[in-house]
Amino acid sequence: MKAVQYREIGKGPEVVDIDVPEPGPGEIRLKVLAAGLCHSDWFLMDLPEDQYVYPLPLTLGHEGVGEVEKLGDGVDGVQVGERYAIYGPWGCGVCHACAQGKENYCPHAAEMGIAPPGLGAPGAMAEYVIVDDKRHLAPLGDLDPVESASLTDAGLTPYHAIAAARDKLTPGTTAVVIGVGGLGHLGIQILRATTAATVIAADVSDDKLELARKVGAHHTLRSDDDAVARIRELTGGEGAVAVFDFVGIQPTIDLARETIAADGFIHIVGIGGGTLPTGFFSTPYGAAVRAPYWGTRPELLEVLDLARAGAIGVHVERYGFDQAVEAYQRLHDGAVQGRAVIVP
C-alpha cells in the first residue's frame, strides 16, 4: 500500500510502498478515506537526532477517518463497512484521566510506550491504518470524510481550549484568536457557535485574515506593531477575556500577554517554542496561562455534532498521495489556506 512516511532524520516526508498491516487482537483495520496534515508533523520532523525518540520509519497522519475493513480477534460492537473518525491522543485506558475520556492527559502513556497514530505509532496517511481499540473510534455518520478528517485535531484542539474558558466568554466579552491557520479558522467558528463573545482575529497574512472574515470573525487585524493598541481600542482599553494563540512563537505570545484582561485566560495552543513567564508584574492580576493539549473523547463527539449541525466546517485543500510532499512543503511555507488533506 502507499504511505507517507518520515524515514530519515532531517529529510522530511516521503511517499513509499509498504505492506498492508494486519490487526491483532482487539484492533481494527480501517481503509483510510482522508488524512489531514498538521504543523505538529513538521515539529516532529524538525527535531534534531538527539531529541527524536520515535521509531523510524514512521507513517504520518494523526488526523484520520476511515471505513472498517477488517476486525482483529475479540472485537465486538464494530461492523465492517462502518465509518469512523479516529481519536488520536491514546492513553492507557484505565487511569482516572482515561476513565473520564481525558486520554489526552493520561499520565502513563509515555512510560508505557503508548503514542498517538502519526506521532509515534503508525498513522493514517496510508491506504490502511490500525486502530488499537474501538474506544478510539468516533462514529462519522453522514459527515463527509474529507471535510471531517481534520476535525479530529484541528477541530478538537481549539474546541478543548475554548471549552476551558467558556464560562468567561459571556455577552459583552472579547476573545482574540492569533493565527488563522488550520486550527485558528476552526477556533473562530467554535467561538461563534458556542459562546457570545466578540471575536478578534489576528494574523500576518491578508489571505488568512480574509478567511477569518469568511468564517465569522467580528474584527480582523494584522499581527504587527499596532496590534496591541488596536485590540485595546476594540475592548475599551480592558483587553480580551481570552486569548487563544494558535502559533506559539515568542512574538504572538508577547501579543497575548499585552492584550489579556485582568482575570483572563491565555491559552497557548501552537507549538512554536515561545514561553510566557507568569506572576506579579508579568501578567495582569488573576490572569491564567494554560498550554492545553488536544482534547477529550467526549469533546470529539461534540465537535462532530457541531459539524453535523452545520455550525463549523473545515476549509480544505485536497491532495492525492503523489502530491503529499508538495502539500507538506506548502504547509511548511505557510501557504495552506485552512487544512491540507490527503485523499487516497
Image (cartoon, rainbow, N blue to C red):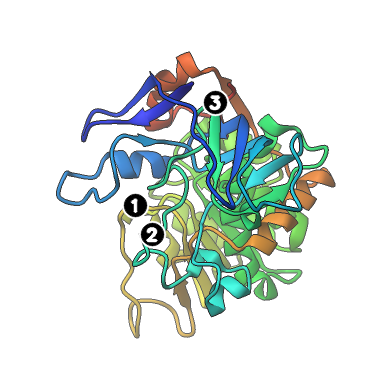
- The residue sitting at 49% across, 18% down in the picture is 321
Alpha carbon distance from label 3 to label 2? 38 Å
Dot 1 lies on which element?
Answer: loop
Q: Amino acid at mark 1?
A: Ile
Alpha carbon distance from label 1 to label 2? 6 Å
**Residue wearing tag 1:** 249
Quadrant of res 310: top right
Q: Position of residue 219 (x, y in %)?
A: 64, 48
Mark 3–mark 1 CB contact (< 8 Å): no
Quadrant of res 99: bottom right
Q: Residues within 10 Å of mark 2 (few under 14, many from 20)?
A: many
Mark 3–mark 2 CB contact (< 8 Å): no
Taking 13 as reference, is 161 left or right?
right
Dot 2 lies on which element?
Answer: helix
Q: Amino acid at mark 3?
A: Glu
Alpha carbon distance from label 3 to label 1? 34 Å
* Closer to us: 76 or 6: 76
**Is 160 rendered above or below residue 225?**
below
Q: Residues within 10 Å of mark 1 (few under 14, many from 20)?
A: some
**Is 140 rendered above or below residue 98?**
above
Q: Amino acid at mark 2?
A: Ile
- The residue sitting at 25% across, 51% down in the picture is 53
**Residue wearing tag 3:** 127
**Residue wearing tag 2:** 253
Q: Position of residue 303 (x, y in %)?
A: 71, 53
Q: Position of residue 308 (x, y in %)?
A: 82, 45
Q: Nearer the viewer, mark 3 or mark 1?
A: 3
- The residue sitting at 79% across, 52% down in the picture is 305
Sequence-wise, which precedes: disc 3 or disc 1?
3
Q: Position of residue 226 (x, y in %)?
A: 43, 50
**Is 328 rendered above or below residue 214?**
above
Mark 1–mark 2 CB contact (< 8 Å): yes
